[in-house]
Amino acid sequence: MEQPLIRVKNIKKIYNPGENEVRALDGVSLDIHPGEFVAIVGHSGSGKSTLMNMLGCLDVPTSGKYYLHGQDVSELEDNQLSEIRNKELGFIFQGFNLISNLDARGNVELPLIYRRLDKASRRKLAEEALRKVGLGERMNHKPSEMSGGQQQRVAIARAIAARPPVILADEPTGNLDSKSSEDIMKILMALSRSGRTVIIITHDDDIAKQVKRVIRIKDGKIEKDYLNENGQSELGEREE
């Protein structure tokens, strides 16, 4: 089997160490391979958002190791983590986080500036990404001129424009109606089929049922890790 793209070993995240400490993550270990489509599922306070922050290099663990592409990123400095986020990771958030006075193309181009791409290259990648999410006709529209589903598609285009190997989606359908949610899930599935590693953070079991692998987290620990393929087959029971 090929090497995991992501390897987490006994990660802990402890806030307020001591008598009133909170163990947001309490010894989490997992491997995620290239091209996997994974849902990390848990209720509010389960630790799933803290885990996403670790996987997205937005935070570092109190202890334990995180390897991305074989590189130990668990003890890197902020500027090094920022560079990894820029090259390796694409983020999709529940709240879209679009700039209101920029059109769709401008919003998608913005992160590409930090990659020091020239204007023509930025525009090419942005337009390509917007066409990929079905917004080829709305590149000049501002967020206020688009529905919630369209705004989330702009956010996905922004996440994929630089072609990062890993897409992290935090409750990507949380603010959407059922039809828009369905459309967003189809786009994420297509990204997975094209070889991207897609990780969704969600509390929604209906979303989890559509994803091939589900990791359930509770009280900072992995409670279950299984595949949604011909029924739920526990990972511990399948051949590695």
Image: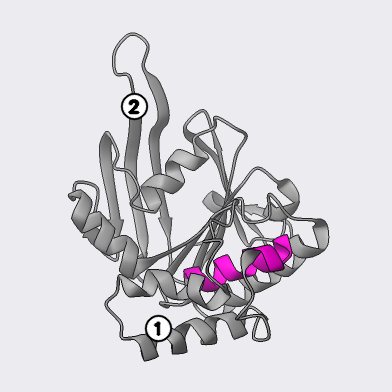
Residue 20 lies in quadrant: top left
Q: Is residue 156 magenta?
A: yes
Q: Nearer the viewer, residue 216 or 80?
A: 80
- Residue 134 seen in the current view: yes
**Residue tagged 2:** 14
Residue sitting at x 55%, y 58%: 38
Magenta stretch prevailing secondary structure: helix
- Residue 117, compared with residue 167, is above or below; it is below
Callout 1 environment at 10 Å: few (<14), some (14 to 19), or many (20+)?
A: many
Query: For the N terminus, which image quadrant?
Result: bottom left
Residue 149 lies in quadrant: bottom right
Task: Give the color scheme: rainbow, by chain, secondary structure or one colour.
Answer: one colour
Give the magenta part as a residue range.
Answer: 144-159
Q: Is residue 54 left or right of residue 181?
A: left
Q: Is residue 62 left or right of residue 90?
A: left
Query: Which of disc 2 and disc 1 is earlier in sequence?
Result: 2
Residue 176, position in %: x, y?
74, 55
Residue 200, position in %: x, y?
57, 55
Which residue of the protein is positioned furthest toward the front in this rendering?
101
**Residue tagged 1:** 122
Q: Secondary structure at mark 2?
A: strand
Callout 2 environment at 10 Å: few (<14), some (14 to 19), or many (20+)?
A: some
